[in-house]
Image (spheres, rainbow, N blue to C red):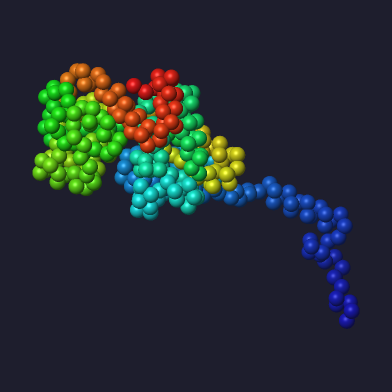
């Protein structure tokens, strides 16, 4: 009976029953195979919040491009989820991102102008990304947002940035005297410098106001020029377009501080790449929108030569003045950096 408990002569023991050198060799082989095989790498999941819906050209050409490039450059280690203003209204997104409720924010400074003027003031600057970095402007913007719980990843610029649609052409006039223009605060300096009267209206009300003649025109970001069918009532398009739209890609410091060096490097490097791409492609994108507006029946209208020559300078002066009223010495210093580098009109 006792013999039935012993292994038969010649029978093989299972590996885990082996002892001494045999067991050691087996364990080393298994360990080597495990180390040699593919290993699962924990992915970094980032939630990006956009101030615009996905229909906005800037979301498709900038935010989505950035997400795709980061995922590719990281070999899929960094992945994104995208939410728009349906998650949190555009004017309320800065604080939730700073708190780490969202990881990354794609936005424009006007959406948080009541909190910070920095992201709006940079629309007075026009220069290639390398010059912006060398001037100290980029670092100044980064330091500003770091003090508010965020880090700057990219400032992709679209230029020309803004357009003025009018009910009737200028016919060579030098100003907007007698014209009521729907404008956001960022356009106020330009409109008033040209003699126009600023009217505040929510965007959905602009079409009816144009139709009734309550307003004579609307200042608007060029990339958003087709968001509303204002071309049905505004028949003229001021040329040239003017200014810059500086988008911001910001990451929560709460998130940034949890990332390893490799992830930080990818996010930063792709931020620079996005800035370069935007600078090279912006004229193509904006020309496409202008072309579509003209195809809808708007006619190009030119102010007198003197106004055309100083249009960008008038724009920049207005943006700087707006920024300094809100941001004080910090914005004044930013302007000094930009002027020293020759990157603001």
Q: Nearer the viewer, residue 207 or 55?
A: 207
Count of marks placed on residues = 0
For residue 335, what is the image quadrant?
top left
Q: Nearer the viewer, residue 129 or 41?
A: 129
Q: Looking at the picture, tell me which residue is in the foreground, 6 or 183.
A: 183
Question: Where is 154 relative to 335, above or below?
Answer: below
Q: Quadrant of the C terminus?
A: top left
Residue occupying the far right of the picture: 2
- Residue 268, compared with residue 174, is above or below; it is below
Counting from the top left corner in percent of width and height, residue 99 is at 49, 50
Residue 147 locus on image (x, y percent): 51, 40
Name the residue at 73% across, 49% down.
32
Q: Residue at x 40, y 35 (%)?
A: 327
Q: Is residue 232 visible?
A: no
Q: Residue at x 86, y 54 (%)?
A: 21
Which percent across, then down, holds residue 198? 21, 37
Quadrant holding the N terminus: bottom right
Q: Is residue 300 above or below residue 267?
A: above
Q: Position of residue 304 (x, y in %)?
A: 17, 20
Q: Is residue 202 left or right of residue 36?
A: left
Can residue 149 be seen in this snapshot? Answer: yes
Lateral position of residue 100 relative to residue 324, left or right: right
Residue at 33% of width from left, 33% of height from top? 322
């Amino acid at each position: 009976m006792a013999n039935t408990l012993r292994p038969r002569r010649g029978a093989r023991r299972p590996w885990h029953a082996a002892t001494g050198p045999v067991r050691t060799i087996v364990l080393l082989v298994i360990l080597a195979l495990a180390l040699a095989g593919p290993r699962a790498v924990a992915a970094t999941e980032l939630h990006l919040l956009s101030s615009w819906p996905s229909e906005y050209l800037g979301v498709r050409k900038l935010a989505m491009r950035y997400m795709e490039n980061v995922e590719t450059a990281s070999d899929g280690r960094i992945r994104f989820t995208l939410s728009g203003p349906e998650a949190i209204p555009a004017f309320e997104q800065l604080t939730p991102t700073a708190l780490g409720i969202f990881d990354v924010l794609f936005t424009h400074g006007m959406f948080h102008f009541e909190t910070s003027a920095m992201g709006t003031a940079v629309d007075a600057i026009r220069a290639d990304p390398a010059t912006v970095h060398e001037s100290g402007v980029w670092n100044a913007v980064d330091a500003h947002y770091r003090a508010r719980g965020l880090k700057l990843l990219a400032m992709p610029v679209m230029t020309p940035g803004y357009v003025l649609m009018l009910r009737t052409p200028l016919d060579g006039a030098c100003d907007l005297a007698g014209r009521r223009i729907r404008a956001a605060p960022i356009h106020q300096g330009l409109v008033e410098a040209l003699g126009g009267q600023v009217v505040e209206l929510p965007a959905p009300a602009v079409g009816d106001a144009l139709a009734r003649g309550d307003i004579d025109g609307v200042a608007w970001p060029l990339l958003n020029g087709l968001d509303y069918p204002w071309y049905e009532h505004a028949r003229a398009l001021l040329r040239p377009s003017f200014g810059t739209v500086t988008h911001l890609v910001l990451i929560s410091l709460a998130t940034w501080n949890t990332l390893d060096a490799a992830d930080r490097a990818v996010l930063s490097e792709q931020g620079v790449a996005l800035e370069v791409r935007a600078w090279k492609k912006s004229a193509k994108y904006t020309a496409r929108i202008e072309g579509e507006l003209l195809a809808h029946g708007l006619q190009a209208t030119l102010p007198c030569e003197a106004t055309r020559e100083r249009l960008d300078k008038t724009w920049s002066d207005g943006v700087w003045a707006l920024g300094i009223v809100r941001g004080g010495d910090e914005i004044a210093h930013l302007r000094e950096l930009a002027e020293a580098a020759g990157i603001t009109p």
